[in-house]
Amino acid sequence: MGCDNLKDNMAKCNCTYEGCDKKGKCCECLQYHLARNELPACCFPNSVERTFDRSFEMFIKTYSGNGNKRPGR
């Protein structure tokens, strides 16, 4: 099954994991990470994404009262 939005998604995907075969395939990416109790790269600012810590704990730490903007903003 192809992704109708792949081109647009690729332009917005901030995943830096070199071997990722889910880049731009948001549905697959979200399912993959949620199954591992993680969030995808797009939920984090670039500086945090590069650490590859995609845990819910890191998400809370990143966005709880320290002035960081919400994802996509």
Image (cartoon, rainbow, N blue to C red):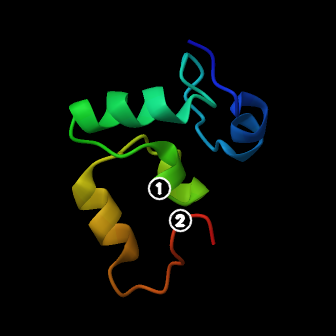
SS for callout 2: loop
- Disc assigned to residue 71: 2
Pointers 2 and 1 in contact (C-beta within 8 Å): yes
Q: Amino acid at mark 2?
A: Pro
**Residue 16 drawn at (x, y percent):** 60, 35
**Residue 37 drawn at (x, y percent):** 21, 40
Where is residue 22, by image quadrant? Answer: top right
**Residue 9 drawn at (x, y percent):** 69, 39
Residue for point 25% across, 55% down: 56
**Of the residues under marks 2 and 1, which one precedes in the sequence?**
1
SS for callout 1: helix
Instruction: Name the side, left or right, on which 64 lies relative to 23.
Output: left
Mark 1: few, some, or many residues within 10 Å (few <14, many ≥20)?
A: some
Q: Nearer the viewer, residue 28 or 47?
A: 28
Quadrant assignment for the C terminus: bottom right
Instruction: Name the side, left or right, on which 11 lies relative to 62.
Output: right
Residue for point 36% across, 46% down: 39
Instruction: Name the side, left or right, on which 3 lies relative to 55.
Output: right
**Residue 20 drawn at (x, y percent):** 54, 20
Asked if residue 66 is positioned above or below residue 6 in the image, the reply reads: below
Mark 2: few, some, or many residues within 10 Å (few <14, many ≥20)?
A: few
- Disc assigned to residue 43: 1
Asked if residue 13 is positioned above or below residue 25 in the image, the reply reads: below
Q: Amino acid at mark 1?
A: Cys
Q: Nearer the viewer, residue 2 or 73?
A: 2
Where is residue 53, by image quadrant? Answer: top left
Q: Residue furthest top?
A: 1
Where is residue 58, by image quadrant? Answer: bottom left
Quadrant assignment for the N terminus: top right
Residue for point 29% across, 42% down: 38
- Report, in whole angstroms, how far the alpha carbon at label 2 lies from the one at label 1: 5 Å
